[in-house]
Image (tube, helix red, strand yellow):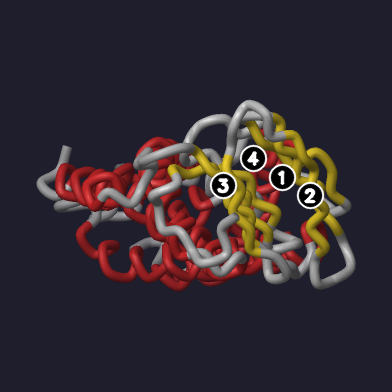
Amino acid sequence: MNWTGYPSRRLAVNGLLTALAICVNQLEGMFPHPLPGVKLGLANALGLAAFGLFDFKDAVMVSTLRVITVGLTFSGLGLSFGCSLAGVGCSMVVLLLLGRLWPERLSLWALGQAMAMGFNLGQLAVVAWAVSSPSLFLSYLPIMAGSSLVTGFATGTMAGWLMRKAGASKSPGRGPI
Amino acid sequence: MKVLDAAVVLTIAALGLSPLVMGVSPSVSGPLVVRISSPTLNRTIRLDPSTHLTIRVQSRDGGFNLVEVQGLKVRVSDADCPDRECVKRGWLTSPGDQAVCLPHRLVVRIEGDGDELDGLSQ
């Protein structure tokens, strides 16, 4: 690995990805969303890119810093913060489990979809808990699964593009997508 | 396409379809009702063309949502929650339609009368 052993560069790129994630997080508010508090999760692309470029812990850093920053500055530490935190937690668990299958056996877009599903399940669980209605969880499952397939594909593609821009192809073993 | 891509897509699709297969999602049996559930109120109202009423749901933190029933359709017509997502949801008309107010922990949902009825129906 070239620059994974190069802390200052790695830190700089992670900072950049976090900043971008915060921007995307704000921009995606313009899209319609099925439930209050629930986000599409397009900003997860930046965490995925951090994983692709570096390692699992970089993805955790970029994703959690984004959620905490957005919570502290814009949306407040209410339920939508709880949704995002639970969503990111779940998507990171999925990444931990499936990440090692990429790139040999799993495409980046499929990894993005699996993470999006984790993200959506986490968010949905928080909303269902908040309104104490388990049936809400089940009734929104189909739309959340459909949305995961679409947004996950988008985040995977975005992450692949970002990684090419950041020069991931220079690091051996982890080519783009 | 890599070996396991299809497995991911199929797993997500299976998860998404599971409630439909299990029959939890909109099954319409009998006349339509609207279920209003919040920490302070649980009420089921039969929908028929002559029903016209507005219910004020008080939330724990002192806020409110106005649930308006107009014949066979229902909406949250006003609320003082910060995001007003429940009001923006607009009219609910078919079984499975629901409006959620997260700050006030309120769910308004149209269902068939046979679906998971609780003892508070009227």
Numbered badge on residue B55? 2
User: Horizontal placement of A58 versus B21: left or right?
Assistant: right
Q: Amino acid at mark 2?
A: Ile
For the residues labelled 3 and 4, the Cα–Cα distance comes to 27 Å
- Measuring 37% from the left and 38% from the top, which residue is drawn there? B28
For the residues labelled 3 and 1, the Cα–Cα distance comes to 11 Å
The residue wearing badge 1 is: B86
Label 1 crowd bin: few (<14), some (14–19), many (20+), radius 10 Å: many
From the top left corner, tell me how far across and down residue B54 is, in percent.
80, 43
Of marks 1 and 4, the one in the foreground: 1
Tell me the quarter of the picture where residue B40 sits.
Answer: bottom right
Who comes first in sequence, dot 2 or dot 1?
A: 2
Numbered badge on residue B109? 3
Q: Quick one: which residue is furthest to the left in this view?
A: B3
Check chain identity for marks 3 and 1: say if they share one.
yes
- Does residue A93 appear in the picture of this structure? yes
